[in-house]
Amino acid sequence: MADQKLTDKTAATSTGTGDKYYVVQGGVDKQIDFDDMGFGGSGTVTSVAVSGSDGIEIDSGSPITTSGTIALGINKATLLTHLNLSETNTLGFAFSDETTDLAVGVSSISFQMPNFATTLTGVSVNVVTAPTGSTAIFDINEAGVSVLSTKITIDAGEFTSEDAATPPVISDSSIAANAIMTIDIDQVGSTITGAGGKVWIYFTRT
């Protein structure tokens, strides 16, 4: 048989079990079976992992579907951390001007919460002029009912409730969509009442 170039051979359209190939190894023509080439076989993928810290992860359950796809999911907390974002939202309102003495009273200000249910995670009050002589005390209400079992206090001589000796305690953290919230001033400083009050509401979407 006359010599032939590889380019003269008809290209194979498919390969599979039972096919044989010829190779040159160490200058010697040799025959090799398709099955010995390591291309055949079958098996089941039992686990898949995604390595990273960006919030992308394999969904729980069976990640490999019958069509051979991998179901990916998002870990919200990890993704927010990766993007340097927080799940917590903040609302802030002034409930007095900057110079007028604070005065005891209910509903010093009212405001509407977002149009979706929320969960309170924190509350705070700060002032421009610190109360003296006694602690200033504030309350937050949803539809006229307090959401605090321990009210917000600003200690005498201080400007914020963040460092109060007694921190506020939220007793009702579940706030309805479009809830009307009000701020009460329950007590002011006995010598200097305090002035320039602002309230801060921290919440997440339920």
Image (spheres, rainbow, N blue to C red):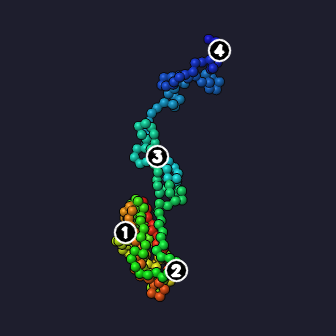
Question: In which quadrant is the N terminus drawn?
Answer: top right
Image location (x, y in percent) of residue 84: 54, 59
How far across and how far down the image is residue 76, in percent?
46, 55
Q: Is residue 118 above or below residue 150?
A: above
The quadrant holding residue 66 is: top left
Mark 2 element type? loop
Can the viewer see residue 147?
no
Q: Could you say which disc has been placed on residue 99 in the image?
A: 2
In the rendering, which numbered label is found on residue 3? 4
Quadrant in which the C terminus appears: bottom left
Q: Is residue 99 visible?
A: yes
Q: CA distance from mark 1 to mark 3?
A: 40 Å
**In terms of depth relative to the viewer, which is nearer, 166 or 196?**
196
Distance between the Cα atoms at labels 4 and 3? 55 Å
Residue type of the residue flagged with mark 3:
Leu
Check disc 2 and give the amino acid type. Thr
Of the numbered discs 4 and 3, the one sitting upstream in the chain is 4
Residue 120, by quadrant, is: bottom left
Residue behind mark 1: 142
Which callout, 4 or 2, points to the residue nearer the camera? Answer: 2
| Badge nearest the viewer, 1 or 4 | 1
Residue denoted by label 3: 72
**Local crowd size for mark 4, using a 10 Å CA cut-off: few (<14), some (14–19), many (≥20):** few
